Image (spheres, grey):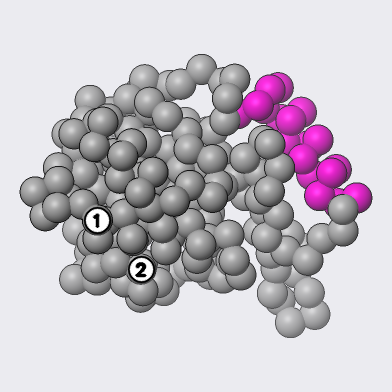
Amino acid sequence: MNPYGWAPTGAMTRRHVLAAALGGMALAGCDWGAQAPLAEDSGKVLWEADPQALLQSAQGPVPLKDSLQGRALMLFFGYSQCPDICPTGLREMGNALILLTPEERARMRAVFVTVDPARDTVQVMREYVALFHPELLGLRLEGEPLKTLTRAFRVYYKLGEPDALGAYPVDHTALTPLVNAQGQLVKLLPYGVKADQLVSEIRKLL
């Protein structure tokens, strides 16, 4: 993990990691996690990312805007075939949901957004998020809606080159954005934040 909130998730040498980190700096122009201004309309971008989009849950699909608008949100961007970064982050999100009371959970949502929609199909997303907590929601967007959403939340991602079997890594920002009930992005938590820290930050928004 580097100080720019960027996580290499494939098999990469130190030289590749450094080059990618520098590339992320060049794209951002600064440290996305600490220096970039927080976009007050990030929640709106999320709710209106795609009028037809549905969130995937353990119980099936649910409407995007109706489920998120007016609630505090914690998000994580990644992909289901991520070997370690995403499972670790989502496990802590799931543990945070366990620590919150039912009343608190009713006032917030935890959302996993895939940056690899080609492999993360609707069914894959539904099954994947259910592994971490039944109330964790998965969002799958494609094309420009996904690009717009990742820009709004300071997320960088890049698909790697496929190997002989067609498998490929995805390098991506490993921050946890927090959004208040008014739809404002208020904090970007670094990778490695623990469940109790997530709970403390979420309760500040409720």
Is residue 18 part of the magenta span, yes or no?
yes
Residue displayed at 60% across by 45% down: 173
Is residue 184 rendered to the left or right of residue 35?
Answer: left
36, above or below 102, in the image: above
Q: CA distance from mark 2 to mark 1?
A: 13 Å
| Label at residue 132 | 2
Indicate the quadrant containing the C terminus: top left, top right, bottom left or bottom right. Answer: top left
Labels 2 and 1: the sequence-earlier one: 1
How far across and down, in percent of the image, does residue 125 sit?
39, 68
Is residue 129 part of the magenta span, yes or no?
no
Residue lying farthest to the left in this orientation: 103
Magenta highlight range: 15-32
Q: Nearer the viewer, mark 2 or mark 1?
A: 1
Residue highlighted by disc 1: 99
Q: Is residue 50 visible?
A: no
Type of secondary structure dominating the magenta stretch: helix
